[in-house]
Amino acid sequence: MTRPFLKMNGLGNDFIVVDARDTAFTPAPEQIRAWGDRASGIGFDQLISIEGSPQGDAFMRVWNNDGGTVETCGNALRCVAWYLNRDASDKTLKIDTLGGLAKARVLRADAKTGTASVDMGKPGLDWHQIPLSEEMNTERLELQVGPIDAPLYHTPVAVSMGNPHVVFFVADVNRVDVTATGSLIENHPLFPEGVNVEFAQIIDRQTIRMRVWERGAGITMACGTGACATLVAAARRGLTDRSATVIMDGGPLHIAWAENDHVIMTGPIEVEFEGTL
Ligand SMILES: N[C@@H](CCC[C@H](N)C(=O)O)C(=O)O
């Protein structure tokens, strides 16, 4: 059976989006890995299917390119919002995910691009079994990768945005070996279900530079849930205001942690091409 898809991205974090509202889509993990391979397949960070939902406008299912199902994806939520509301009518969409219900508004849309704002819900500050202090320090996690003068990574902040994140604050994000360090932390025994890893450098109280190692996908150009987790971690530690721009390799997202505890993510989407699986 053939399936049409859209190749989309949010700040370079890229997806294959399949509309499965009428016909079920249940790809096997090895098939996802083959499609996701950038050398021999189509290449993407996540595979997304849009399904029907009894409690929302749609259900968004997410697989990483290693074939594993995960709870949610912030950048893909903006893409799905654009897909469901391409005329950018003044409408709040409810998009359900395994990580919880998100509410999205499309602020601008044309045939190939758009801007959307997503209420990602409340961050989880006690998502993991690891003992967290008041400051949410994961005090048992400390590691050094590389030569003796390499940076020491320690006391990250653990935040759930529906999916798990640990955020490390560093003096210079350009000195971080994201692949070596990120893959070690993703597979650290403290995180039996794996974890997304953010390395964040505070520029000023409204600006954070962040690089990410995504669970099940490796280095990506941007991570929406990672940007939200980073802002929550920084604001909770008193390093930034509750509203800031998080600049990733693929560009900036605006994140606000509102007084009602909800995290609002605003940023762009882009359509690259369409095709058939
Ligand atoms: N790129 C995403 C997150 C995708 C899932 C993540 N790798 C996980 O395993 O939880 C985003 O924009 O949030």
Image (cartoon, grey):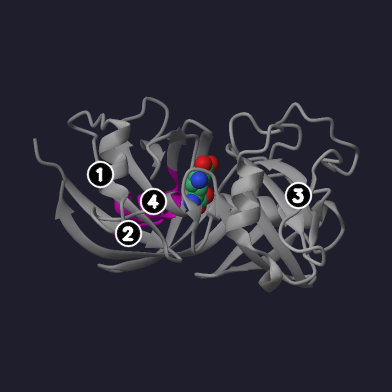
For numbered disc 3, what is the local secondary structure?
A: loop
User: Image point 67% across, 38% down: which residue?
Assistant: 188
Q: Is residue 67 magenta?
A: no
For marks 1 and 2, the one nearer the N-term is 2
| x, y percent for residue 48 | 34, 43
User: Image point 71% across, 62% down: which residue?
Assistant: 200
Say whether residue 185 is visible.
yes
Q: Residue furthest right?
A: 134
> Label 1 to label 2, Cα distance in Å?
11 Å
Magenta-drawn segment: 77-93
Is the residue indicated by label 3 positioned so its CB lies within 8 Å of ligand 1?
A: no
Label 4 sits on residue: 81
> Label 2 to label 4, Cα distance in Å?
12 Å
For numbered disc 2, what is the local secondary structure?
A: strand
The crowd level at tag 2 (other Cα within 10 Å; few <14, some 14-19, many 20+) is many
User: Image point 23% across, 53% down: which residue?
Assistant: 41
Front in this rendered view, residue 104 or 212: 212
Pair 2/3: label in front = 2
**Which kind of residue does numbered mark 2 sit on?**
Met
Label 3 sits on residue: 259
